[in-house]
């Protein structure tokens, strides 16, 4: 400062120059708890931002605000001048209001190496930026991040964006006590809880943070905050070994951010008052109330290559029913292009096709393809140029905006194979051979993957001891004795994991000798008439293995069958195995093939020569 001294006649008698130092300060941070081991590949640095200096008087009134008087004293023949005065500060309430409504924060420091950090230690921020030059520093960019815990019953990744739907949201329990703790003396280990009250469109809500703090000082930040402008009150209860503390604070909603704050009247650190309850009384921690809600028909889409940010413009309402699945075709028409309808959303009110949007909006329109309810247990499988899904009626595919039924579920119970002797069938195949679960019962609730090489759907039920394979081009089905607990697949891979954690590549054929069994359904070549089968040609080939082939006959499709003929082969088979025999006439016949075969085993067809019988005579 520089002061010019004048007398009553306004003549300059001299001047004085000097400095006034008002309360030097430093910025520090305290490590209560710290662990970034699981985030090393994501967190690169930690930046510190601060608001500008609090405004304590109007900027254009700085000079007018300085009011000083000079007192002259004379003692021991020494004349002294004492400068006395003050600054006309703004009202304290106005200072608080301006402080809370600051919307800009400036970066003052960056930390990229925290390897030496220790819990329970303070570290100074090396701030070399003058407060009056903060406006030249990097500004903290605003964002719409919410601390709500968001879970999704349905998730899908498409075009390098994460899609989540049928959302379940849980209110943030609140910041931990350590965030408000600013003391540095007389540390205690305490148990605590913080209860925050909110008024939302769903009514009154209450959230509770609870935990332990190893370094508690009964000095809290003048600013206490909750990241939701609906919050109106906060209660803090702390219990140490010898003392209980309690404080209640009314929160004020911020005008510029989604938060509510309490700021101490004197802008000084807050000390919690001693609670009247004895310190030995256990903490009675309240339960959260109305802190969870669902959005069953909402779809949210993340930013490109960023699964943490979900812009508000990428929020879509799909029908009025619960979203149960999301799918898209797996083969792009060109790089990043998936046709007019890149995404299909399955709901309890039908299937919707989402149309491409313009600019930053991913999807511009939605069209309902049908009203068939798709329940959560209905499998949905993306194929190369179509999408397969199931309903209670059968197996369907979607191409573009067209839906086609591939397979109708036949609820007829499968034939009972127990009347056929199984002493020659490998024991590992018996469950798959004898189980009578219908197709719809098997598929509903199963996990399904698509083998792009074999064009097959692999359906697994962990509760059954076999899996079902459906060949899409022919709709032929067969069972395998493998039991998988999970399947992982994309356009070029198909992996399976069993209950023991073993992983299998299902796109690679096994080179091992494999047990096999084929048990045909009851066959009749002339309905309800007796037939005599004379020859059966098995058109098959294999390089090595052992086979047992048999023919069985019976007059009741659901009754017992008797063995008519049996042959075996324990060597290479070039193309066919003939069975020639004589035997009685039957209405129904069953073929059984079992044994152990090499991976090149191939069965193309079975040729049958038979004679029809009328009144026990040849026709």
Image (cartoon, helix red, strand yellow):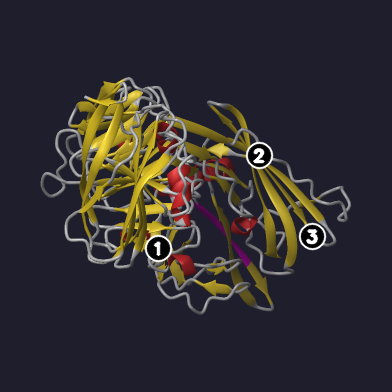
- Does residue 69 show up magenta in the picture? yes
- Where is residue 122 shown, x and y percent of the image? 58, 73
| Span colored in magenta | 66-72
Dividing the picture into quarters, in which one does residue 528 lie?
A: top left
Q: Which residue is mark 3?
A: 240
Q: Earlier in the sequence, mark 3 or mark 2?
A: 3
Q: Is residue 185 above or below residue 263?
A: below
**Disc ID at residue 503:** 1
If you read the primary sequence from the N terminus, does the residue marked by circle 1 or circle 3 appear first?
3
118 is higher (above) or lower (below) than 583:
below
Q: Position of residue 66 (x, y in %)?
A: 50, 53
Quadrant, the N terminus: bottom left
Name the foreground residue: 58 vs 492.
492
Q: Nearer the viewer, residue 153 or 235?
A: 153
Quadrant in the picture for the C terminus? top left
The front one of 507 and 274 is 507
The Cα–Cα distance between marks 3 and 2, rounded to whole angstroms, is: 23 Å
| Residue 21 appears in view | no
């Amino acid at each position: 400062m520089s002061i010019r001294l004048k007398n009553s006649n306004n003549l300059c008698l001299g001047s004085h120059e000097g400095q006034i130092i008002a309360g030097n300060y430093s910025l520090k941070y305290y490590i209560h708890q710290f662990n970034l081991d699981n985030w090393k590949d994501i967190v690169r640095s930690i930046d510190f931002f601060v608001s500008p200096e609090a405004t304590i008087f109007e900027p254009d009134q700085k000079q007018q605000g300085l009011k000083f008087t000079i007192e002259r004293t004379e003692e021991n023949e020494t004349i002294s001048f004492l400068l006395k005065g003050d600054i006309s500060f703004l009202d304290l309430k106005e200072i608080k209001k301006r402080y809370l409504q600051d919307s800009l924060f400036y970066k003052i420091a960056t930390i990229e190496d925290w390897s030496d950090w220790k819990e329970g230690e303070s570290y100074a921020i090396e701030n070399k930026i003058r407060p009056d030059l903060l406006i030249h520093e990097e500004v903290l960019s605003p964002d719409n991040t919410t601390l709500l815990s968001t879970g999704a019953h349905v998730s899908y990744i498409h075009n390098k964006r994460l899609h989540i739907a049928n959302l379940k949201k849980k209110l943030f329990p609140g910041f931990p006590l350590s965030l408000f703790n600013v003391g540095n003396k007389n540390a205690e280990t305490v148990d605590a809880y913080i209860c925050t009250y909110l008024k939302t469109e769903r009514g009154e809500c209450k959230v509770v943070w609870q935990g332990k703090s190893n370094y508690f000082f009964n000095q809290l930040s003048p600013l206490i905050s909750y990241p939701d402008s609906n919050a109106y009150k906060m209660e803090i209860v702390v219990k140490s070994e010898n003392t209980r503390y309690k404080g209640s604070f009314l929160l004020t909603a911020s005008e510029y951010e989604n938060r509510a704050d309490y700021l101490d009247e004197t802008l000084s650190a807050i000390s919690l008052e001693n609670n009247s309850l004895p310190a030995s009384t256990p903490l009675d921690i309240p339960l959260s109330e109305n802190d969870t809600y669902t959005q069953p028909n909402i779809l949210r889409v993340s930013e490109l290559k960023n699964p943490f940010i979900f812009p508000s413009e990428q929020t879509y309402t799909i029908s009025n029913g619960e979203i149960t699945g999301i799918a898209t075709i797996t083969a792009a028409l060109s790089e990043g292009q998936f046709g007019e309808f890149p995404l299909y959303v399955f709901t309890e009110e039908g299937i919707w096709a989402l149309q491409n949007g313009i600019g930053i909006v991913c999807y511009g329109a939605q069209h309902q393809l049908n009203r068939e309810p798709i329940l959560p247990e209905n499998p949905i499988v993306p194929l190369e140029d179509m999408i397969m899904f199931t309903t209670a009626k059968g197996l369907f595919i979607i191409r573009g905006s067209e839906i086609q039924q591939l397979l109708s579920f036949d609820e007829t119970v499968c034939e009972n194979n127990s009347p056929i002797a199984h002493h020659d069938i490998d024991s590992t195949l018996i469950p798959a051979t004898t189980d009578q679960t219908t197709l719809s019962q098997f598929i509903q609730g199963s996990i399904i993957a698509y083998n792009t090489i074999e064009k097959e759907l692999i359906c697994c039920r962990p509760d059954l001891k076999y899996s079902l394979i459906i060949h899409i081009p022919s709709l032929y089905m067969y069972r395998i004795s493998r039991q998988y607990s999970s399947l992982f697949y994309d356009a070029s891979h198909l992996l399976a994991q069993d209950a023991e954690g073993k992983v299998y590549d299902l796109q690679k054929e096994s080179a091992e000798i494999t047990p096999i069994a084929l048990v045909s359904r009851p066959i009749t070549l002339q309905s309800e008439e007796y037939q005599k089968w004379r020859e059966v040609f098995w058109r098959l080939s294999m390089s090595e293995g052992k086979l047992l082939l048999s023919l069985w006959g019976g007059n009741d499709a659901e009754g017992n069958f008797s063995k008519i003929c049996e042959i075996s082969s324990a060597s290479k088979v070039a193309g066919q195995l003939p069975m020639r025999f004589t035997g009685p006439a039957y209405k129904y016949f069953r073929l059984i093939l079992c044994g152990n075969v090499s991976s090149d085993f191939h069965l193309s067809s079975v040729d049958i020569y038979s004679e029809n019988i009328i009144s026990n005579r040849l026709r």
